Image (cartoon, grey):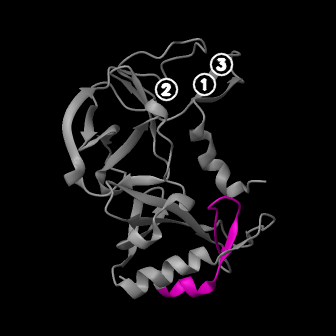
Amino acid sequence: MKKWSMLIFISILLVVSGCRPSAFGGQVVIDWVDFIHIDGKEYDGIHSGVLADESFVGDKVGTVKFKVADNVKNTSYKIRDGDAAFHEKGTEIFQIKDHPHLIAVKNDRAINGYRVYFSRDNDIEYHWNFKDMPIEKVERIEIYQTDPPAGNIMISKLTKDEDVNSFLQLLVNSEENPNFQPNRGNADPIFYEMIFYTDEPIAYKYYMQFDGETYFWSPWDTSIISNEIQMFIDRN
């Protein structure tokens, strides 16, 4: 059973997660996945990855022609070339160098300035889950605190091998506890984003939370992280 902390992310795995009648006038509201359709291919947003560096961005391959969110109310609408779920008309689309199944668009609120997408064409599988991450190739780790008004704020960067390895080991050794309920006595848990850089153009991104007593995350089911991880938080 997935915990509440994963529910805010899981809807992006669906093309259209659902349609529901509005309380006003009975109109249908469509919840769109974050996608871009270009050159006959549909690209889905990579929810557990970010662009590793702007140097991986290649040539412009097109622009968004139509934003479907807020504009399409018909559930039988057929996606067309140039459509995007959430990007405005005119948004430029770029290829990731040497990776034809990856594209990117500029996004000021995204870590490293771009939102990245991948195509499932040719049976390419999504491989940015924690179990797929090549731990031995992680070169550095960045930790951001998620602050909705201000965006993501970097609070720590780990570059020394011993720090990187120790941090990774704490995650590997986290104890699965699907029945865990965070302490909400004083406030909502603090959200963190952990970014893991390898030699790939997409860095791996996972979420961690702290409820004032316990650090936890959801590589699949909710898992409890040792409070030793505190030594790596807010080191800047």
Please state the extent of the stretch shown in magenta in the rendering. Answer: 215-231
Between 31 and 229, the residue placed more toward the observer is 229
Within 10 Å of disc 3 (Cα), the crowding (few <14, some 14-19, many 20+) is: some
Q: Horizontally, is 145 left or right of 157 in the view?
A: right
159 lies above or below 197: below
Verify CB contact (< 8 Å) between mark 2 and mark 1. yes
Direction from residue 26 to residue 84 in the image, left or right: left
Separation of marks 2 and 1 at Cα, in angstroms: 8 Å
Badge 2 amino acid: Ala
For residue 52: magenta?
no
Looking at the picture, how far across and down is residue 39, in whole percent? 32, 21
Could you tell me if residue 150 is visible in this image? Answer: no
Looking at the image, residue 197 lies above or below residue 226: above
Residue 231 in the image: x percent, y percent?
A: 50, 88
Kind of residue at badge 1: Ile
Quarter occupied by residue 43: top left
Quarter of the image containing the N terminus?
Answer: bottom right
Residue found at x 42% / y 15%:
80
- Point out the image quarter for the C terminus: bottom left
User: Which structural element holds mark 2?
Assistant: loop
The residue carrying mark 3 is 28
The answer to which image quadrant residue 76 occupies is top right
Q: Which residue is mark 1?
A: 30
Which quarter of the picture shows residue 195? bottom left
Q: Amino acid at mark 3?
A: Val
Residue 196 in the image: above or below residue 224: above
Residue 163 x %, y %: 42, 85
